[in-house]
Amino acid sequence: MQIGRKIYYLKSNGNIIVNTGECQGDARETTEDEDFKMYTVLQGLEQSAVGLIQLNYGQLTDKFISCTGYYVDITKNPIDTSAIVFSFTTPEATLDQVKQAKYTELSQACQNAITGGFTSTAYQNTSKVYDSTLEDQANITGNALSAVSKISGVAACANDKFYYRAHGEDFAEWTAEECLQLARDFKSFKEQQLIKNKELQAYVATLTTVEDVQKVTWNTAIPNA
């Protein structure tokens, strides 16, 4: 029996959690529930927060062997094998070339994080997760701008009502103040991701070996100086 690899990734940012590899012979294909019990890195994670891409046996094997890293582009729709983004550097690649590839990888991971959802207590002071695709960002901004007009006393906006929803929930009526707070929370969240990206890229710039550069991911904790 030939069994293709499974790629488990974080839905929030596209970072890879585990690649199960592929196998053949006397093997049985495991279920997703079994994988969450089998792989230590999956244990403790909410299954709803983890995405899965199933590949056929031999599919993209050459790329997995030759690449120096990969992640899932969560902005793709649908998310399938085409959403797996590989980075490559040849054995002859210089340190600067490897760094440039890493800068690009981190920038994409940052974008994935920004569009992967965020948490806010804006609505009724209750912590909820909100989608943050580009369309969602436009909707949040639009509500905030209308809310500013209403709060500022623009006569034409006096009777405006606002409706929004958290991830997986139905639309509900919001106050103008709640709309503004959601926009503030997203602004803060986005700035945090941009700062993180800047700090990681600055850290990569200080590294002196190809091996150390390739080890850096979006989840890397920058060591204290």
Image: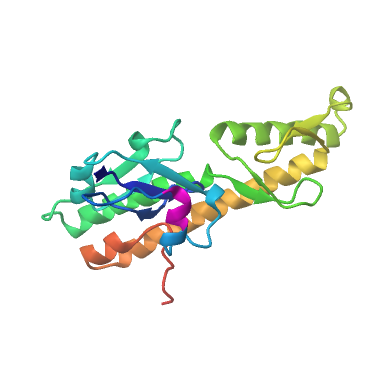
Image position of 136 with respect to 31: above or below: above
Q: Residue at x 53, y 44 (%)?
A: 116
Quadrant of the drawing holding the C terminus = bottom left
Main SS category, magenta section: helix
Position of 75 compared to 3: left or right? right
Q: Position of residue 58 (x, y in %)?
A: 21, 41
Image position of 148 with respect to 48: above or below: above
Q: Where is residue 76 in the image (x, y as percent from the top left)?
A: 43, 34
Q: Which residue is drawn at 45% across and 49% down?
A: 32
Q: Residue at x 56, y 54 (%)?
A: 46
Q: Position of residue 42 (x, y in %)?
A: 46, 59
State the residue in front, 27 or 201.
27
Position of 160 compared to 117: left or right? right
The number of numbered discs placed on residues in the rendered structure image is 0
Image position of 196 with respect to 124: above or below: below
Position of 72 compared to 215: left or right? right
Quadrant of the drawing holding the N terminus = top left
Position of 195 compared to 55: left or right? right
Q: Residue at x 85, y 22 (%)?
A: 156
Residue 43 falls inside the magenta stretch: no
Question: Which residue extends farthest front?
Answer: 26
Q: Which region is colored magenta?
A: 31-36
State the residue in front, 50 or 194.
50
